[in-house]
Amino acid sequence: MSELFELLEPIGSRTLVNLQAQAEDVSAALSALESVDAGARLWAREGSLWAGDDRTVAREVRDRLGWLDLPRDMRVDVPRLKALATEVKAAGITRVVLLGMGGSSLAPETMAAVLPTIEAGCELCVLDSTDPAQIQRVEQQAPLDQTLFVLASKSGTTAETDSLYAYFKARLIDELGKEEWSAHFVAITDPGTKLARLAARDKLRATYLNPPDIGGRYSALSLYGLAPAALAGVDLDRLLLAAQEMAWACRSTVPISENPGAVLGAIMGGCARAGALPVDKLALLTSPRMAAFGPWAEQLIAESTGKAGVGIVPVEGEDLASANRLSRDRLFVYLRLEGDDNEAVDALAVRLVGERHPLAVLTMVEPYALGAELFRWEFATAIAGRLLGINPFDQPDVESAKARARQAISDYEETHELRQLPVLLTQDGLRLSGLAVAADDLASHMAALFGRVTEGQYVALMAYVDRSAPNIAALQALRGALLTSLHVPVTLGFGPRFLHSTGQLHKGGPNTGLFIQIAQDETADLSIPERSYSFGVLKAAQALGDWEALQEAGRTAVHVNIGADVAAGLDELGRLVGEALRQMEGEA
């Protein structure tokens, strides 16, 4: 630890840095924020800070800044959330399954993974997938009569949540009868939504209406995050107190250079907007216990900043220990929990500083400081949006993929077939579609694509398969091989989960990605009650909508269908990618 801290210096409060060549860029960013009084204007809800003279956008932004008051205002909701947890526990519930996507699911998933509980709460499981195998696995992990399902959707019309509700409602009616099933559901949504009306009609156990002036990815400290966390046994008072302390440290009267949220935002935005090779890849390092923070931060940053051709590419979950060279477009941010087993990550951080990469270290004194970090990163991302010249509170390209998926489902309902992508090459059970190159086999085709990847770019693995431990391990191995050979950041997302996270960045951010979409043939599908299509069809339609949106955005993409045996298909894909990388290196 001492060696790492000897390399760092404080910048403002609560942040230590070694910014290397980016120090001047960050200093300029802080000055720019100071010149427009960014901190005070954010707290004053001045939408013009991001919208300029566009009054319509300024009004829309102002109506998305309710998250600023959550650390204080949500304290009054804690008693009723504790009461719900007590009631559910008394009813014999041992497991909570959260049916939500993106901003409605990632924060409580992080809280449950990171925070010690004040009492034995329910096991919390997030089901944010339409993959039939994943749905069946979650269903079978515990008896349904001991399970509470939390429906979470800001819009009240989220396709995944709606379909999963229909499925588990039917399963519970079959198992418990028409009188008992509804006590196993709780809804969280905004006022006046379809879900709010449905919850009242079906007489669910409880319905929570969240303040409508909070966007999904800024909702961590709202009912979307706190209600599931309460059920898991999290100490909400302690979490909100930490968040309130950070909000006070970021208050409007604090100079920008002393504001920990603004300083982090200046580091993020200042690095990303400067130079011929912008340092626009934010690689997150964490203490082992804080690993679950990565997917939440990834969603917040990607969906907030990736638009209008600019953005910060968050990279979480990479194994950097064996990477012998890393691209120069990376900013490393280390979320360090004191008292955790930090030796390996500290050593990596020291190595990165020695290799002249910019590094910021954010120190947490104890796990419940997570509340402070949730607020700090939301504040920082809003500030970074100002520096990048974009509106960090909308997500225009998320809807484009959703609309195409809906059209694919509509077409399927008429023809009972989904549109198929033209196949360029078939080999060893794999089918490849997408950008055509001069190649006779899959390995040569991939080698040609990989050969085009240069510094400043990244590779995105987008897997429409079960997010199971074996599949994660196989894809992480593939990710590691690409990182080692191409020396650029490699991200990994599971569909449709990532569509509510990095999907916006993929289509709206910098056109610097190589997108590898991985799909499968379904063999053990699940029907969706009262629908003319199955979960497998819905997942395939979402992949198709994602693909078509990438094509319209002019992205470089390849689609690989790995067949019905996912394990064998991923193994074969890994083998072919390894062969492609060897070919590429042999030609260099």
Image: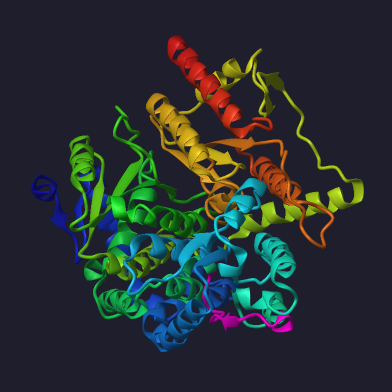
Q: Position of residue 203 (x, y in %)?
A: 69, 83
Q: Is residue 447 left or right of residue 168?
A: left
User: Is residue 46 among what the camera can see?
Assistant: no
Q: How many numbered marks have been drawn onto this rendered protein structure? A: 0
Asked whether 209 falls inside the magenta stretch, the response is yes
The stretch in magenta equals 200-215
Instruction: Tell me which corner region of the image, top left, top right, bottom left or bottom right, holds residue 376.
Output: bottom left
In front: 523, or 28? 523
User: Does residue 171 appear anywhere in the picture?
Assistant: yes
Q: Residue 585, image x and y in percent? A: 43, 15
Residue occupying image coordinates x 40% and y 47%: 316
**Which one is in front, 274 or 43?**
43
Residue 69 location in percent, x, y? Answer: 41, 82
- Residue lying at 44% horizontally and 10% vertically, measured from the top left: 586
Q: Is residue 55 above or below residue 541?
A: below
The extreme right residue here reads 414
Q: How is the image coloured?
A: rainbow
- Relative placement, left or right, of 282 versus 84 is left
Tell me where residue 143 sits by quadrant: bottom right
Q: Quadrant of the C terminus?
A: top left
Up-down relation of residue 281 to residue 10 (above or below): above
**Which residue is at the far top?**
586
Question: Does the magenta portion include 208?
Answer: yes
Please give left or right for residue 51 compared with residue 419 in the image. left
Residue 120 coordinates in the image, percent (x, y): 38, 71
Work out whether residue 552 or residue 287 is closer to the camera in this orientation and state it. Answer: 287
